[in-house]
Amino acid sequence: MVIQVRARSDEAKATRRVQILSEARVLLATTRYPDLTLTQLAGRVGLTKPALFAYFASKEALFLELYEVLLGEWLDRLEEHLRLGGTHTPRSLAALFTELATDAPELLRLMPLLAGLLEHNISAARALAHKRWLAGRLEAITPLLERALPGLPEGGGVRLLTYTQALIAGLQPMSEPAPAVREALEGSGLALLHVELSTALQDSLGALYEGLRQQGESP
């Protein structure tokens, strides 16, 4: 039986929101997003599903905030690396991005859902807050990125990060096929059609970054 205990003070509500996001992160590590229910999540934090809506207006709003938490952590790690100084080749930068990305599997599982799902069923105000948050993070990190990869065209740092996310969003679901698809590929001599994320991502990012740099070097 779930005992509903709502937080009362602002501090207690903030603590409860962090708890909910933490449990959502744990569930996301083992459960596909479509199979993850708010009832299941509410039970893990001692709330009923209706009480959960006092903290997040929808499932999409909850996981959009979790996406911001995970992306913020990932950008912090990237910024830490970039602030060490030095420059990269397209291939070495692709290797760095791949290493950081594959160390954040929950973030990678949310990236394919962002534009087509998580940004739906939220208010215009929440959407604006998300875009402003993202713009602020990009403003801080793109100068570091453009110094790290000489030859990027003007605005190339934002484009590089945007296209990187698009590649991850496309490749990640292909690397975690449905059980029936995985079984079919393994048992029919078609295993080569299965995408190994780390290899595919590093190859794709290397080609992308080389192409962006060549654009910046063109007269």
Image (cartoon, rainbow, N blue to C red):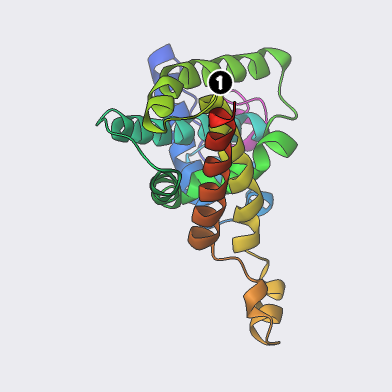
Q: Is residue 56 one of those drawn in magenta? A: yes
Q: Name the one closer to the observer, 120 or 212.
A: 212
Q: Name the one closer to the observer, 18 or 101.
A: 101
Q: Residues within 10 Å of mark 1 (few under 14, many from 20)?
A: few
- The quarter holding residue 76 reads top left
Q: In the visual, does 166 lie left or right of 200?
A: right
Please say if 2 is above or below 15. Answer: below
Q: Amino acid at mark 1?
A: Gly
Q: In the visual, does 24 lie left or right of 119?
A: left
Locate residue 8, reporting x and y percent. Answer: 46, 16
Locate residue 118, reporting x and y percent. Answer: 67, 34
Locate residue 166, reporting x and y percent. Answer: 64, 41
Give the residue at mark 1. 155
The residue positioned 43% from the left and 49% from the top of the image is 91
> Magenta stretch mostly in which secondary structure?
loop
The residue positioned 66% from the left and 65% from the top of the image is 177
Please say if 176 is above or below 52. Answer: below
Range shown magenta: 48-58
